[in-house]
Amino acid sequence: MKPKLSFVLSGILLSIVLAGCSDVVVNPVRAADNKAVLLEIQAVAKGLGLESGNIRKSCAMPFGCSANDFYESTAYIVDSSLTDKIICSRFVELADSVGYTSSWRDDHWPEEGPDGKVENLVEGCEESLGINDGVGNTSQSAGVVFVGTKATENSKVNFWVQVQSVVQPDGAPEGERGYYFSISTFE
């Protein structure tokens, strides 16, 4: 086989393999529950003015998805009328609305734990989002996270919601500041 043809064929095969594993689930009923919970949280978030992005399978592997039942969404929110205070108020309102069970901030280890909560989540969120280092993707602030569990008819679904600020992510117009907002279900 000629080298050029084998390269093309291997590229096509890799694409088929990666596309084929993108929707691999372990248990279709559980996967449907995970997706339904993510959609429910997205609907509440949207009602509060937090855009959530498109839903996709959670992928733990860099070159495709392992078989799992989990889903995620990530959005980059840009609106010059938004401030850290507004984003954090909406984030905490979402946490309260979906019945979060714990929360923490990156780089604040004492807050972490199975039942730990940031004492004042709005203030803690504002503090964390307010610190960026430079510009570009590496300027992301510390993440602010809440987690919880939703019971469905068939199972319990754990969820994770996180927000971070970023200054002029790679490719963005000069001076742009926005927020990464992600939701995921997990084991």
Image (cartoon, helix red, strand yellow):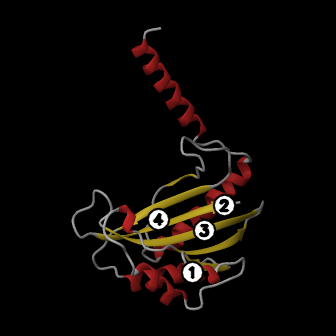
Position of residue 100 measured from the top left corner of the image (x, y, whole percent): 64, 78
Q: Which one is in front in this view, the residue at disc 2 or the one at disc 1?
A: 1
Asked if the residue under mark 4 is in contact with the one under mark 3, i.e. CB atoms within 8 Å, the reply is: no
Q: CA distance from mark 4 to mark 1?
A: 26 Å
Determine whether 165 is above or below 71 in the image: below
> On the rendered structure, is 69 left or right of 169?
right
Badge 2 local density, few (<14 within 10 Å), some, or many (20+)?
some
Q: For residue 2, what is the image quadrant?
A: top left
- For the point 48% across and 72% down, which residue is it? 163
Q: Are marks 1 and 3 in contact (CB under 8 Å)?
A: no
Is there CB contact under 8 Å for labels 2 and 3? yes
Q: Which mark is residue 186?
A: 2
Image coordinates for residue 26, horizontal then vertical, percent: 73, 45
Say what secondary structure mark 2 lies in. strand
Q: Dot 3, crowdedness within 10 Å: few (<14), some or many (≥20)?
A: some
Please state if 128 lies on the left or on the right of 160 as rendered. Answer: left
Residues 48 and 74: in front is: 74
Nearer the N terminus, badge 3 or badge 4? 4
Q: Which residue is mark 4?
A: 52
**Residue at mark 3:** 160
Which sits earlier in the primary sequence, circle 2 or circle 3?
3
Distance (Cα) linking label 1 and label 3: 17 Å
Amino acid at the residue labelled 3: Trp
- The residue that disc 1 covers is 108
As rendered, which of 61 and 155 lies closer to the eye? 61
How far is disc 2 from disc 3 in space, using C-alphas? 7 Å
Labels 4 and 2: the sequence-earlier one: 4
